[in-house]
């Protein structure tokens, strides 16, 4: 692969993936196509080798712009998405535009241009909740919130292009990802930055014992890269962290790392339809010689330290639109 298009490459995982490609493959060129929504941030790309990185501001819901940017690329990896479950509950229109229509534009452009690899980054949330055991790729999907439903819609469009047109589409389903540069609406950076500021941590009441499987961002990037280069077209690969933790356990760990007490925990009304537990089995990707390498305790400590040491990154975000969102989402209950 000489030139790859990465969509959503100014967001959290996408920006790490751009750096991953430029670090690991000295001759690769990356075309980074991103709309720069509230979650996209050019600061996430500071220091990348600009001679091998071309940034294009664009919307994957714009078919012409997608085709133009993809022309000349051997592969496309789609990270671009609306990604926050709570925002999808408040209103899902943009989720449909980007996570469904946008994916359609990507596979349609790839079909027209004859792109030799299309990797759609998806999520373990498409399986829905599981009480015991772990989902395998062969299990049926059962998305239960508007975000995961829109991601499943994009996946199905992609899979239909493999079956109908032979387009070499590969799908990855990753678990909850954590690391530096994550927008502070997601639980880990939200709780870490609030704890730094002695603000309440709005833990969903009734969801304290819900379980998420934590995957370090660089491990997620290496899993996607493995599937991209060694996966079979038409196949789905789970990318699991193997670190299932209850939300209360993560919350206590963040408080401990920030030197704060449990009095900062503020139980707020639960997320509607809050999925209890996500768990996926990654043995199919492991068979391609992929392993997550980050220890959970160490990864969370590294991540919280990053937020402690990079206030200049997140303080400007936690103003304006963010504060409006915060008020709408948590209201008086978070004070
Ligand atoms: P993010 O919200 O941090 O970033 C999304 C990026 O996509 C932003 O840069 C944004 O500007 C861009 N974008 C949004 N709409 C766009 C559009 N219409 N056109 C072009 N660019 C657009 O997201 P993230 O957490 O980095 O997630 C990246 C991908 O990984 C998503 O597809 C998500 O569903 C998937 N995923 C995320 C996780 C997780 O825990 N964060 C886990 C599994 C899978
Ligand atoms: O599982 C993969 C998914 O992980 C990705 O596909 C999504 O893009 C990503 O946002 C993430 O979804 P979650 O809903 O699991 O992440 P979030 O950080 O929003 O919430 C994690 C858990 O923490 C969840 O059980 C809800 C809880 N939570 C979250 C927030 C924002 C709280 O208790 N309080 C909060 O304020």
Image: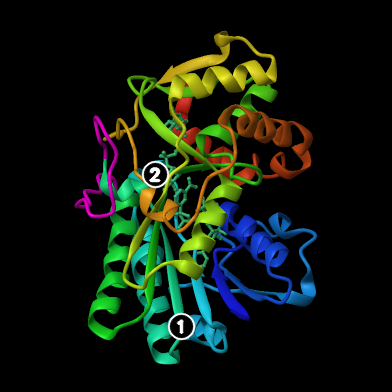
Residue 298, picture quadrant: top right
Mark 2 residue CB less than 8 A from any atom of ligand 2: yes
For label 1, the SS is: loop
Q: CA distance from mark 2 to mark 1?
A: 32 Å
Q: Quadrant of ligand 2?
A: top left
Labelled pair 2, 1 in contact (Cβ < 8 Å): no
Give whichever of 97, 299 is nearer the camera: 299
Q: Is residue 241 above or below residue 112?
A: above
Point 63% across, 81% down: residue = 2
Residue 20 visible in rendering:
yes
Residue picked out by circle 2: 85
Is the residue at mark 1 in contact range of ligand 1, meaning its CB lies under 8 Å from it? no
Q: Is residue 48 left or right of residue 177?
A: right
Q: Quadrant of residue 107?
A: bottom left
Q: Earlier in the sequence, mark 2 or mark 1?
A: 2
Q: Is residue 7 above or below residue 199?
A: below
Q: Nearer the viewer, mark 2 or mark 1?
A: 1
Q: Position of residue 118 (x, y in %)?
A: 44, 74
Q: Position of residue 279 (x, y in %)?
A: 34, 38
Range of the magenta residues? 129-145
Residue 208 in percent (x, y) is at 39, 20
Name above or below for residue 145 compared with residue 45: above
Residue of label 1: 116
Binning the other alpha carbons within 10 Å of mark 2 as few (below 14), some (14 to 19) or many (20 upward) gives some
Give the vertical position of 325 relative to 66 (above or below). Answer: above
């Amino acid at each position: 692969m000489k030139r790859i298009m990465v969509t959503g490459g100014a967001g959290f995982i996408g920006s790490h993936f751009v750096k991953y490609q430029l670090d690991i493959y000295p001759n690769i060129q990356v075309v980074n196509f991103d709309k720069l929504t509230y979650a996209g941030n050019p600061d996430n790309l500071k220091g990348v080798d600009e001679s091998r990185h071309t940034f294009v501001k664009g919307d994957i819901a714009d078919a012409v712009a997608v085709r133009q940017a993809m022309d000349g690329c051997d592969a496309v990896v789609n990270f671009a998405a609306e990604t926050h479950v709570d925002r999808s509950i408040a209103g899902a229109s943009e989720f449909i535009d980007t996570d469904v229509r946008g994916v359609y534009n990507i596979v349609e452009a790839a079909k027209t241009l004859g792109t030799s690899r299309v990797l759609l980054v998806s999520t373990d949330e498409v399986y829905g909740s599981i009480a015991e055991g772990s989902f395998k790729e062969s299990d049926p999907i059962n998305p239960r919130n508007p975000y995961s439903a829109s991601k499943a819609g994009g996946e199905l469009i992609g899979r239909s292009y493999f079956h109908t047109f032979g387009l070499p589409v590969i799908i990855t389903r990753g678990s909850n990802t954590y690391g530096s540069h994550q927008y502070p609406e997601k639980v880990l950076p939200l709780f870490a930055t609030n704890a730094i500021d002695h603000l309440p941590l709005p833990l969903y009441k009734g969801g304290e014992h819900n379980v998420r499987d934590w995957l370090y961002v660089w491990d997620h990037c290496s899993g996607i890269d493995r599937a991209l280069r060694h996966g079979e077209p038409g196949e789905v690969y789970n990318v699991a962290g193997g670190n299932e933790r209850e939300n209360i356990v993560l919350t206590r760990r963040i408080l401990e790392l920030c030197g704060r007490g449990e009095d900062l925990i503020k139980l707020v009304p639960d997320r509607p339809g809050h999925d209890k537990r996500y768990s996926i089995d990654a043995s199919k990707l492991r068979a391609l010689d992929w392993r997550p390498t980050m220890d959970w305790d160490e990864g969370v400590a590294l991540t919280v330290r990053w937020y402690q040491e990079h206030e200049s990154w997140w303080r400007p975000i936690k103003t304006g639109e963010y504060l409006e969102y915060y008020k709408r989402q948590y209201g008086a209950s978070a004070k």
